[in-house]
Amino acid sequence: MIKHICMFKMKENANGKSGYENALEAAARLEEFNGKIPSLRKIEAKVNAKDAPQDNYELVLICDFDDIDGLNEYQKHPVHVEFAKALAPLRELRACIDYEF
């Protein structure tokens, strides 16, 4: 199994919304990936606590795949590609790790 974890530091005032607000919207959209990407076994999208330190990343994505091929399928899937394009102008930083478990 492969665990895919991405964290996103959101820009402030992108699209006229705070980083927190954009993270909430992104998390809701990510949860909609369930059932739409065949190789995706599990997905969680969480938003940092509103009162947590300001230098924390606002959004985390945690996904499970059977193998690295499944992760690679996910990366190219139109649902993911569309989301990534929409998120790009809203995020400042991205940190990611993929590991076997």
Image: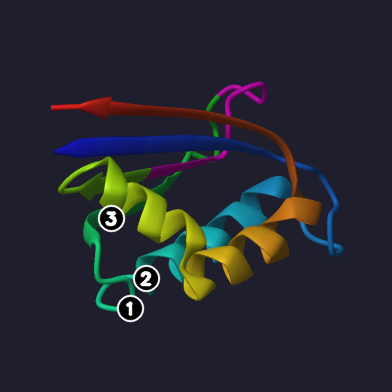
Amino acid type at circle 2 is Phe
In the image, taking residue 25 as reference, residue 14 lies left or right, namely: right
Residue at (68, 57) in percent of width and height: 87
Separation of marks 1 and 3 at Cα, in angstroms: 11 Å
Q: Given the current orientation, which residue lies at the most extreme front position? A: 69
Range shown magenta: 53-61
On the image, the x and y values in percent for residue 77 come to 46, 68
Instruction: Kindly state the secondary structure of the residue where label 1 is placed.
Output: loop
- Residue 1, by quadrant, is top left
**Closer to the camera in the image, 35 or 59:** 35
**Closer to the camera in the image, 2 or 58:** 2
Instruction: Kindly state the secondary structure of the residue where label 3 is placed.
Output: strand
Residue at (25, 62) in percent of width and height: 39
The residue at which mark 3 appears reads as 43
| Vertical placement of residue 9 versus 14, above or below | above
Please tell me whether residue 59 belongs to the stretch shown in magenta.
yes
Residue at (70, 65) in percent of width and height: 86
Magenta residues, dominant SS class: loop
Instruction: Kindly state the secondary structure of the residue where label 2 is placed.
Output: loop
User: What label does residue 33 carry, if any?
Assistant: 2
